[in-house]
Image (cartoon, coloured by chain):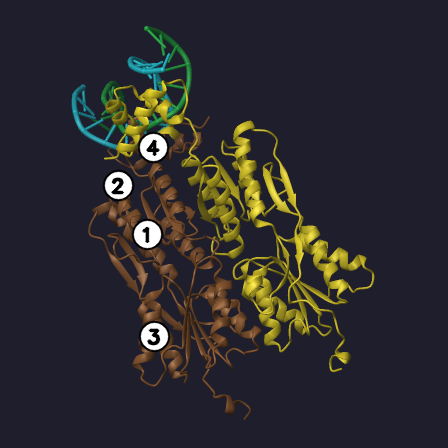
Chain colours: A brown, B yellow, C green, D cyan
Amino acid sequence: MKATIYDVAREAGVSIATVSNAIRGKGKISPKKREEILEIVERLQYQPSMIASALTGKRTYTLGLLVPDISNPFFGEIARAVEERGQQLGYSVIICSTDNKDERVERYISLLEQKSVDGIIIGTGISDASLLERLSSRSVPVAMIARDLPSADVHKVVIDDYLGGVLAARHLLELGHRRFGVISEKHNRERIRGFCETVERSGQALSPCGIRIFGDDDQIQDGGRAAAELLELEARPTALFCCNDMSATGALRAAKARGLAVPRDISIVSFDNTILSEVCDPPMTTIAQPMEEMGRLVVDALLQELGDGGAKQRFVLQPELLVRGSTAAFVPEEQKNA
Amino acid sequence: MKATIYDVAREAGVSIATVSNAIRGKGKISPKKREEILEIVERLQYQPSMIASALTGKRTYTLGLLVPDISNPFFGEIARAVEERGQQLGYSVIICSTDNKDERVERYISLLEQKSVDGIIIGTGISDASLLERLSSRSVPVAMIARDLPSADVHKVVIDDYLGGVLAARHLLELGHRRFGVISEKHNRERIRGFCETVERSGQALSPCGIRIFGDDDQIQDGGRAAAELLELEARPTALFCCNDMSATGALRAAKARGLAVPRDISIVSFDNTILSEVCDPPMTTIAQPMEEMGRLVVDALLQELGDGGAKQRFVLQPELLVRGSTAAFVPEEQKNA
DNA sequence: ATGAAAGCGCTAACAG
DNA sequence: CTGTTAGCGCTTTCAT
């Protein structure tokens, strides 16, 4: 059996209260007794039971993290960042892959509540807004990362999606592109808006000649399909803006399959800057999200709430354009053979 | 405050024991009372506290999963599989990214013990064998996945690494290749052995003209560097065998950087079949690991031990050759222009 | 400076 | 069938 605080107390000839204090450096104990106790703790390999101390009303030092899929590189990196910061602060994190299914979200949240986690971080889609309401009215602090839900009064860490779209559009416009295609998941409206408004405002470009929205089952495939459609257009786009790396790799493949060279015949800008944008060929020009910082911030916001219970914060981080090999200056067909 | 079992009992005019029984369908209760109680549970939104029930000596229904890095696609997929199976069986999983550092392994294990997890799944490297010994002598059941450590007497789920090497070699030999390069992490000796022995045994091929072993910091970069070295050899290999997808993408890039076309000038076989092997160009021929099945099996083995405490099992799964675009028949230089 | 005792919320005998 | 009673291992007043 594992040693308990009683074993230590008996061995040391003191009360359990004293042992507890000695270990946690609380209260006042004579340095000598303290030494003795610590030594016995060591010898008995005593490790306080966190579940017992949690029951006493303290924290569980555990956080729940909801994401669509932990095996999706973007969320894998988010998870890593969250885990890292949690670790530093003494918290562990339970992963919950929801597949963006409300039913799974609900089940996981209920589970996390029963486990009395100290906080829940939501990085997954929630179509039923009332679900989140019910949740935030509960006892567990909640924070959202990478996804926004305006109606929810919780801490949020997001990037400026609109700006991300703007950055992508500007880059492409500067390269001389004038005909664009947009490929996006349905929940990335802001990225699209930023992109389209910038294009329109430039005055010199046609508004995107095609926008394709897809679901979230197989993003690579959906992105490829969407790209294939756009590339069949009579006046086909010379540049594509994809709302994430997954769909962009699909689009990249589709372009190649159609015999188009990237970036020679068509430029592609993706979003996220996960490892996927790095390994594809050409490496993808992308709008990078600061995933590490995002992870750190949600954890901090969440844990801070435990302390002061203060107002909900909303962090909006800046995405950055990362130019790699999938974009190039537009060259009219006529001039290509020159 | 959240409702407790006492609130329900009071409201229902019964004892807490009856409530407990009613909820868990244990003992004998009159159907009528049972109904009543369940109704009140519903109304009060009562959710049993898992930490309280855990303290009573029951399980915590929580598992710990140690991997080098959750943001590495391979481990992301393993984690997803473990999570999935855990979920089905009522368990949640805590992620622990170790970066393959013994110090982090130790810290995480200690933490998991304090949290009284019901089991620990190890999918990370452990250089200090005694660490694992100490661990398995503890109270917590342990299982290993994707990594083997012969000295450890715990459940294991691995693939036949040797066979994986054999499969890769056979494929390449059949394609007519005779000069090979091998790129591997240091802990993948079996894959290398399978590959090399098959090559040698074929009689018709030179033994691998170069083997490069690298660390585990930046696998893409290391893989690229290793490949670059091999490709500079005077009699350079016409085919490369990389021990995982990460290093293979690095090798792929290095080959291209050197002006070599894949698979025209050089073939590459990778290992794992993560999303990386799918998105690179050309898509990578790879030795696929059944990650989902592996995840399912470790969880099952671990939880079964909780029941019978029986003998340690060792599952060895079969890897499979997945031919994609990075391998092609060897064609001598002379004939290429034909 | 230290100890006694009262819970935290629940499960598991054991009585009735 | 249902209630009483002991803990589980720890933290926290409140005395001493």
Question: What is the x, y in percent for residue B22?
Answer: 36, 24
Inspect the image, locate mark 2, and give the three-letter code of the amino acid beneath it: Ser
Residue A69 place in picture, x, y as percent:
45, 53
State the residue in front, A286 or B110: A286
Q: Mark 2 points at which residue?
A: A139
Quarter of the figure with residue A30: top left
Disc 1 vs disc 4: which is toward the camera? 4
Quarter holding the C terminus of chain A is bottom right
Location of residue A174 in the rendering, given as x and y in whole percent from the top left corner: 38, 83
* Discs 4 and 2 share one subunit: no
Question: Looking at the rendering, which quadrant does residue A137 occupy?
Answer: top left
Q: Name the residue under label 4.
A: B49
Disc 1 with disc 2 on a shared chain: yes
Q: Are the two marked residues, 1 and 4, in contact with CB atoms closer than 8 angstroms? A: no
CA neighbours of label 2 inside 10 A, class few (<14), some (14 to 19), many (20+): few
Can residue A249 be seen in the rendering of this structure? no
Q: Which of marks 1 and 2 is nearer the N terminus?
A: 2
For label 3, the residue is A196
Q: In this view, does B88 lie above or below B230?
A: above
At 26% across and 48% down in the image, what residue appears? A133
- Label 1: which residue? A299
